[in-house]
Image: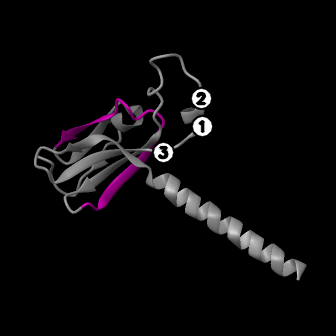
């Protein structure tokens, strides 16, 4: 009987962790969409709850540390790319033909997202 209880508790905990992660990863939309010049693609930022959300800050600094996902979608709302960043407030996409650079993400300077079709 004790082993059965341990298995049930373990199963409930694993389910709660998986569901919690899925809800956390989904995030909430942050700011408006950034459409490509031809409106075939758009970039949407999603805010996720993190430890930095609960840190104390000086007045005027409350919204500086917005962690979350930056996602690229096509015109049919299918996700093409996804990237987690710790400071998404000032990140903006730069559309360059079949490439998308995220201004404000240093690693994207040499490694842009490659689109299936041109954004112009």
Q: Residues within 10 Å of mark 1 (few under 14, many from 20)?
A: few
Badge 3 crowding class, 10 Å Cα cut-off, few under 14, some 14 to 19, many 20 or more, is: many
From which residue to which does the magenta span run? 77-96
Q: Label 1: which residue?
A: 51
- Which residue position holds label 3? 48
**Residue 120 in picture, x, y percent from top left:** 10, 46
| Residue sitting at x 48%, y 30% | 65
Using the image as rendered, state which of residue 97 and residue 48 is in the foreground: 48
Q: Gap between marks 3 and 1, in whole Å?
A: 10 Å
Drawn side of residue 66 relative to residue 103, left or right:
right
Task: Tell me which numbered mark, 2 or 3, is placed earlier along the sequence.
Answer: 3
Give the Cα distance between marks 2 and 3. 14 Å
Residue behind mark 2: 55
Q: Which of the 4 image quadrants contains residue 70?
A: top left
Query: What residue do we see at 39% from left, 51% from top?
Result: 82
User: Element at badge 3?
Assistant: loop
Which residue is nearer to you in this view: 2 or 90? 2
Say if mark 1 contacts mark 2, CB within 8 Å.
Answer: yes
Left-right relation of 117 to 15 = left
> Real-space Cα distance between discs 1 and 2?
7 Å
- Mark 2, Cα crowd under 10 Å, few <14 / some 14-19 / many 20+, is few
Give x and y (percent) for residue 100: 26, 43
């Amino acid at each position: 009987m004790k082993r059965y209880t341990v298995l049930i508790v373990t199963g409930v905990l694993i389910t709660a962790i998986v569901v919690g992660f899925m809800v956390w990863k989904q995030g909430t939309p942050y700011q408006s969409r950034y459409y490509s010049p031809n409106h075939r693609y758009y970039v949407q930022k999603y805010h996720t709850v993190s430890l930095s959300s609960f840190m104390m800050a000086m007045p005027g600094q409350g919204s500086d540390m917005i962690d979350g996902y930056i996602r690229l979608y096509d015109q049919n709302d299918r996700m093409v790319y996804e990237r987690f960043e710790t400071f998404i407030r000032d990140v903006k996409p730069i559309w360059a033909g079949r490439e998308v650079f995220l201004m404000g993400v240093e690693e994207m300077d040499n490694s842009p997202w490659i689109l299936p079709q041109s954004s112009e």
